Image (tube, coloured by chain):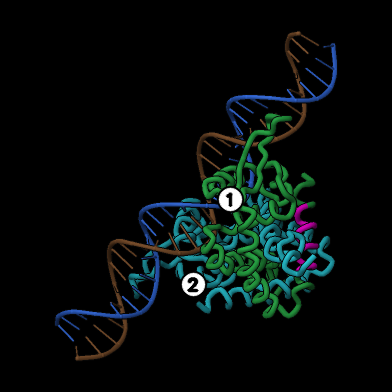
Chain colours: A green, B cyan, C brown, D blue
DNA sequence: CCTAAATAAATTGTGCAAAATTAAATAAGG
DNA sequence: CCTTATTTAATTTTGCACAATTTATTTAGG
């Protein structure tokens, strides 16, 4: 079996493992997030707002590596759920500022008591959580730089 | 900063790194796959057919961890592109068998001469490709088992 | 000033992703 | 046989994901 053959075998393809792992992790979060009426990408937006405070749409996109075409409808759903507000920047009317409502702020406390279970469950089974985290973060950084140096 | 606080920081969230890395890798493959008129999930279906030969829809789903709601329209597009055929199983008319056309078979050779570039590019930047692959495969296995033990 | 370029977000269109429902066919027990 | 449960795929619906285009605004050059 040549090296060229091997590279088309699913078991050897890091790209497939990452792609499938991403969906399985989302599946793992779903039953918990469902209790709060959140999807996984919506949850990540909340995480960024909790950590960094009020942000523009493009700042959210920079952190999450998502574009406005994805974020705009997602943010509208979070606004309908009254977890965030959206308003035009007064200084620069091209920008839309996104911030947490009281309900959005208080959600963090509620989730900390539940979400730990997912995190610790993965930690428990993942014997080397920190090692895996460092590997994937390095991969993300490399892929991000490769994909954007046109 | 408490351990509970830290778990909501984006930099510490393995789930986010996996999710973002998956999209960045797909973005990396896109310009190459575009030349062949394939999307990334379509490419993965072709990889499975090249490796394992003719398969039913559910066999493809088992390998790729995708359900029929995702695969059925995707397979129809591959059929329209004349890379695969689909037909009801003669033995069991519930099953739909998927197989490669001549065009689909020959695509593998064409891609081997181009796709290597993506693979080697990632290998080059990823100092520890095999280590990362093993970590992510272990994570995938754990997440898959956790997500399905109801 | 005033026009041209650049920026920021929204809009549009295509293609996954997955849960829920439906429909068809098979298998199994009585 | 015949009914019931199971299996398998299709269909439907909602929600990302992203490229391409459009619109509005701001910045810079002349």
Residue B22 location (% of width, % of height)? 67, 59
Q: Secondary structure at mark 1?
A: loop
Q: Quadrant of residue B13?
A: bottom right
> According to the image, label 1 marks what residue?
A83
Q: Reply above or below: B148 against C13.
A: below
Q: Chain of mark 1?
A: A
> Mark 2: which secondary structure?
helix
Q: Nearer the viewer, residue C3 or B32?
A: C3
**Alpha carbon separation for disc pair 2 and 1:** 41 Å
Q: Position of residue A25 (x, y in %)?
A: 61, 67
Majority SS type along the magenta span: helix
Q: Is residue A62 above or below residue A123?
A: above
Please name the residue shown 67% across and 75% down the image: A120
Foreground: B141 or B103? B141
Say few, some or many: other residues with alpha carbon within 10 Å of mark 1 (under 14 / 14 to 19 / 20 or more): some
B106 versus A113 height, above or below: above
- The residue segment tinted magenta is A133-144
Q: Is residue B110 visible?
A: yes
Task: State the residue at coordinates (73%, 75%).
Answer: B134
Chain of residue at mark 2: B
Q: Which residue is mark 2?
A: B59
Q: Name the foreground residue: B135 vs A47.
A: A47
């Amino acid at each position: 079996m040549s090296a060229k053959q091997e590279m088309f075998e699913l078991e050897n393809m890091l790209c497939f493992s990452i792609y499938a792992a991403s969906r399985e992790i989302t599946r793992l979060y779903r039953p918990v997030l469902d209790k709060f009426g959140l999807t996984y990408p919506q949850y990540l937006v909340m995480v960024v707002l909790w950590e960094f405070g009020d942000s523009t749409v493009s700042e959210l996109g920079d952190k999450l590596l998502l574009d406005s075409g994805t974020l705009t409808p997602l943010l509208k759903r979070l606004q309908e759920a009254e977890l965030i507000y959206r308003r035009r920047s007064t200084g620069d009317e091209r920008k839309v500022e996104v911030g947490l409502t009281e309900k959005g702020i208080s959600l963090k406390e509620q989730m900390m008591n539940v979400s730990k279970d997912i995190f610790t469950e993965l930690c428990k089974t993942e014997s080397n959580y920190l090692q895996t985290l460092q590997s994937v973060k390095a991969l993300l950084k490399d892929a991000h730089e490769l994909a954007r140096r046109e």
